[in-house]
Image (cartoon, helix red, strand yellow):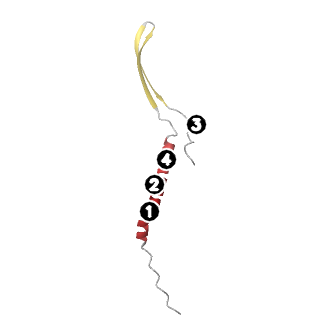
Amino acid sequence: MAPLEQLPTLPAMAALERAQAAHPALVAARQAIESARYGVAVARANRFADPELWLSRGRDVLGGERQDVTAFGVVVTVPLWDRNKGHIDT
């Protein structure tokens, strides 16, 4: 029986990991995954409208007397039917 030939040595695991980390297709795939995650985070954040503040100042005449009037308010949109879930794929 002939002696067995020596098998070639495998590259070190660190070298393989470096090669994988630098491979353009894998880099692009990782960036696509990260971009998709950010897209989902933005879609979730946009489910609710931003609150609005308003301030009004004017003059009013009541009973023949002129008065300065100041008003302020907060507007919050409550999505009862449209919850903006269409942009989030579950």
> How far, Cα to Cα, is label 2 from label 1?
12 Å
Furthest residue in direction right, as rendered: 81
Mark 3 or mark 1: which is in front?
1
Please name whichever residue, 17 or 1, is drawn nearer the observer in this view of the structure. 1
Say which amino acid is labelled 2.
Gln
| Most foreground residue, 22 or 53 | 22
Which label lies toward us, 4 or 2?
A: 2
The Cα–Cα distance between marks 3 and 4, rounded to whole angstroms, is 20 Å
Secondary structure, mark 1, is loop
Residue under the point 46% across and 53% down: 34
Among numbered discs 2 and 3, the one appearing first in the sequence = 2
The kind of secondary structure element at disc 2 is: helix
Residue 81 lies, with reference to residue 19, above or below; the image says above
Question: Callout 4 environment at 10 Å: few (<14), some (14 to 19), or many (20+)?
Answer: some
Query: Amino acid under label 3?
Result: Asp
Contact (CB < 8 A) between labels 1 and 4? no
Label 1, on which residue?
A: 23
Q: Mark 2 points at which residue?
A: 31
To which residue does mark 3 refer? 82
Q: Mark 4 points at which residue?
A: 39
Across and down, in percent, residue 43 comes to 51, 43
Q: Position of residue 64 (x, y in %)?
A: 43, 6
At horizontal 48% and vertical 44% (from top left) the residue drawn is 42
Q: How far apart are marks 4 and 2 (CA)?
A: 12 Å
Residue 4 vertical placement versus 22 (above, below): below
Q: Which of marks 2 and 3 is in front?
A: 2
**Residue at the spot 43% in from the left edge and 69% down from the top edge:** 16
Q: Do the residues labelled 2 and 3 touch (CB within 8 Å)?
A: no
